[in-house]
Amino acid sequence: MSTQGLRSSAVRALPDTGSRRSARPRLGQMLVETGVLTAQDQLRTVALQSRVEARFGDILLAHGMIGKDALYDTIARQYATETADFTRTPPDIRLVEAYGLERCLADGLLPWRRKDGVTEIASARPEQFADHRTALEDLYGPVRMVVTSETDLHRAVLDKHPVTLAARAETRVPAPESCRAWPARALRRAAAALGLLLVAGLIWAPAAVFFAFAAWAILTLVAGTALKLAAALAQVRADRQARAPAPEDPDAPIMARLPSVSILVPLYRERAIASRLIERLNRIDYPRELLDICLVVEADDKVTCDTLEAIRLPPHIRQIVVPHSTLKTKPRALNYALDFCRGTIVGVYDAEDAPAPDQIHRVVRRFHERGPDVACLQGVLDFYNARTNWVSRCFTIEYAAWFRVLLPGLTRLGVVIPLGGTTLFFRRDVLTELGGWDAHNVTEDADLGIRLARRGYRTELIDTVTEEEANCWAWPWIKQRSRWLKGYMMTWAVHMRAPRRLLAELGPWRFLGIQLLFLGTISQFLLAPILWSFWLVPLGAPHPLLSLDVPTLSLVFTIFLASELIGLAVAAYAVRGPKHRFLTPWAPVLMLYFPLAALAAYKGLAELLFRPFFWDKTEHGQCSQAETSVTGVAGSTQGPQPARPPN
């Protein structure tokens, strides 16, 4: 049916279902009069509503004061209409497509059916229906509002349009900003040609080839170490200044009502951790009527789906099933779920996360204080299993250095920071404006951090901690890190498609920061074996460096040792607090820990050529140590290295 065919030649007089708000009876009074709600609960709900941006009925449902059917039957009587029954009469696909799926979800409207020459529109927000009436009549002709719940509206859309929504989730980000057209075949040919040139060079001029790679490795080492040192010094100064509590600002804006917050938690094959996750999420003390927690699962993930079916989810936690696709990435799942979020702020947690109970309150307050140009807040990550083994200890030190020293220091220096994959919070309108996440990028968070900066938005760190499980076995660690490094390679290449434009949008300093954090990190890990070979010289083994004169050789070793010492100093400073002080003697062990990242870099490079969109999932719940409470410090990758991209 065409759009023109939907319109009627004249708009007939219909019952008013949304234009005269003052003439309608109050919902609370109607519920009390019918005996569905007590007068005491009515007064309690009115008091709650004065402090939160939530509808009267949503508060009733969140606190279990009333059943959904009774609520919406009463709302239908309030608006002199009826409730939509999508089970008996599914929505007309032609009517829905004429309005647009994205628009339906954004407006809380679902064109339902044509009846007696009138198009019935199911509204989950009947109080806003009058705002859309003119546009609806322009499209369909005579319209009549019927009532539905947001849950039933979402279910109806999911049941009838999963393929369309799934395709949209994969292409939300504009093609020029996405890596979905990754030229893997062309890159394989280029890599083969470069490999042949390298072999030829090693045959004919091995010393020249070695020194060329060594020069680049040393150059990136110097640049990265300088940036690390500058960031650390900036943060040390800030830490000293922060010892005295800052006085309260009397001119700070006062928040009249709390906003709604949606939390997306992507899950995949999480039998071992799902029940504990629900318990952790229930510790969040934000008002339940404002909290919308979405457990995002893949349709073919029977393990997680069956696990969640056996758990009775509270009203503020719901499951969103993502349709099957050959592309299985975290950002695709997040994009799919984004349209179904109810909050004006959208956060992301990982399956193993244990956020601080007051975290959402602090995030909401910070967004309110900072204003609209701060579009993203990054929280701090820490681990509850740091004592499991040497890998988990090193992982904890590494994250402490990143989140407690380097990342805040880089922010103070004005560098564009790569976001981590969890404890991230966004203004929903900005996230929608940017097209969400790049569904094909395996470090979609780092990519999104750059895209936010390119659009003029700011990201800030917020000192609230989420504890999670540190990867504590070597091979899973390598698999996880290879995905992050592959994503770093991909992200750098995508944003460097038009370097002049990137320079113009970010400015010289932040453009340089992107090169150091991404290209520098990639180079350091890929060329790490060359730098490690320098240790052969003090041992008296033959080495090309021995052909250098003594002053040059001394300079090279001074740079090399200074870099190691600065890294150890940053690590020791990061774990100085009471919770992780026991890790200080383990800081030197990082010299044995980081070589694993070189293996991960080569694995990531190979996948970039042959399996660019493959998501090598991190298994959770594999470490034996029991969880502890959410307190203490946190961290992520050391130096200019991948922050905490997704699991």
Image (cartoon, grey):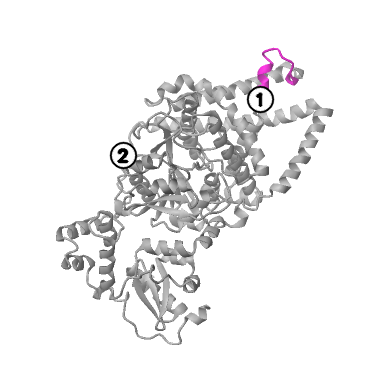
Q: Which badge, 2 or 1, comes first in the chain's sequence?
A: 2
Question: In the displayed structure, does residue 224 sit left or right of residue 149?
Answer: right
Q: Position of residue 640 (x, y in %)?
A: 56, 34
Return the residue at label 1. Answer: 531
Which residue is depicted at the point 44% across and 23% down? 583
Q: Position of residue 320 (x, y in %)?
A: 43, 54
**Mark 2 and mark 1: Cα distance apart in space:** 49 Å
Q: Does the magenta stretch include residue 535?
A: yes
Which residue is depicted at the point 37% across and 30% down? 626
Q: Which of marks 2 and 1 is in front?
A: 1
Q: Is mark 1 on a helix, strand or loop?
A: helix
Relative to 479, say whether 559 is above or below.
Answer: above
Q: How many tags in the picture?
A: 2
Question: In the displayed structure, does residue 344 sit left or right of residue 432?
Answer: left
Q: Position of residue 103 (x, y in %)?
A: 46, 66
Q: Which amino acid does label 2 sit on?
A: Pro
Residue 265 seen by the camera: no
Relative to 106, say whether 498 is above or below.
Answer: above
Which residue is depicted at the point 64% across and 41% down? 607
Return the residue at label 2. Answer: 247
Which residue is depicted at the point 71% across and 20% down? 552
Q: Position of residue 206 (x, y in %)?
A: 79, 26
Q: Residues within 10 Å of mark 2 (few under 14, many from 20)?
A: few
Mark 2 and mark 1 residues within 8 Å of each other at the beta carbon: no
Relative to 424, say whether 336 is above or below.
Answer: below
Q: What residue type is labelled 1?
A: Leu
Q: Residue furthest right?
A: 204
Question: In the displayed structure, does residue 627 sit left or right of residue 409?
Answer: left
Q: Is mark 2 on a helix, strand or loop?
A: loop
Q: Is residue 486 magenta?
A: no
Relative to 268, say whether 244 is above or below.
Answer: above
The segment highlighted magenta reads 530-545
